[in-house]
Amino acid sequence: MKYFSNTLFLFAVDQVLKWYMSAVLPLCTPERCESMEVLPFFKLMVLHNRGAAFSFLADAGGWQRWFLVAVSSVVSVFVAVWLYRIRYEQKLLAVSLSFILGGALGNLIDRALQGYVVDFFVVYYHPYYFPAFNIADSAITVGAALMILDILIGNQKRHESE
């Protein structure tokens, strides 16, 4: 159960930062886009993503909102049940699932309540830009990487015991 506190913490940080960035910087539009450069390859700018990862389906006409809410809800319930049932010794897997769940819930709430996800981190090497992202996206990515690490460690232990 302690891993659900990781989920809640990541969810809260994600929501607070999305609110704060939206209050500090205006929405970036094709007509006007303000940003705050942090490093020569990293800046902050507020964007609204109406689609999935990398803005996939962003221009689909509106149906994607409820489709993505439904998919995110099902995945979140699945991950929450998996996290609840995890064995005590599976710590790395539990941490990975808590990160994935925290991120999924952060983006799910945005999409359900607003119809879009607020992104604000932008990494670039002029003229190349990585798609904008947020804390929730980062948590999902870190969670997935930790899950892969857990799988690799598990395979290593199985091979050593054989």
Image (tube, rainbow, N blue to C red):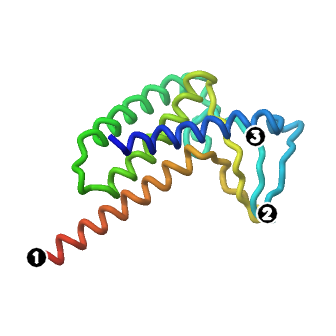
Which residue shows up at 65% across the image and 36% down it? 16
**Residue 2 x, y percent position in the rendering:** 36, 43
Q: In this view, does 35 lie above or below 148?
A: above
Q: Residue 46 carries which label?
A: 3
Q: Which of 85 and 88 is in front in this view?
A: 88
Residue type highlighted by circle 3: Val
Which residue shows up at 45% across the image and 47% down it? 99
Q: Residue 39 carries which label?
A: 2
- Mark nearer the N terminus (1 vs 2): 2
- Mark nearer the N terminus (1 vs 3): 3
Q: In screen coordinates, is 4 left or right of 118?
A: left
Q: In this view, does 113 lie above or below 126?
A: above
- Mark nearer the N terminus (3 vs 2): 2
Instruction: Please identify the residue farthest to the front as the structure is shown.
Output: 2
Q: Nearer the viewer, residue 81 or 47?
A: 81
Q: In this view, does 12 lie above or below 144?
A: above
Instruction: For label 2, count other residues whose C-alpha is less than 10 Å away and answer few (under 14), some (14-19) or many (20+).
Output: few
Instruction: Please identify the residue farthest to the left as the structure is shown.
Output: 162
Q: Mark 1 points at which residue?
A: 162
For marks 3 and 2, give the CA distance.
Answer: 17 Å
- Label 2 near label 1: C-beta < 8 Å? no
**Residue 21 x, y percent position in the rendering:** 75, 39
**Quarter occupied by residue 161:** bottom left
Residue type highlighted by circle 2: Leu
Q: What element carries label 1?
A: loop
Q: What element carries label 3?
A: strand
Which quarter of the rendered picture does the C terminus lie within? bottom left
Which quarter of the rendered picture does the N terminus lie within? top left
Q: Residue 51 carries which label?
A: none
Instruction: For label 3, count other residues whose C-alpha is less than 10 Å away and answer few (under 14), some (14-19) or many (20+).
Output: many
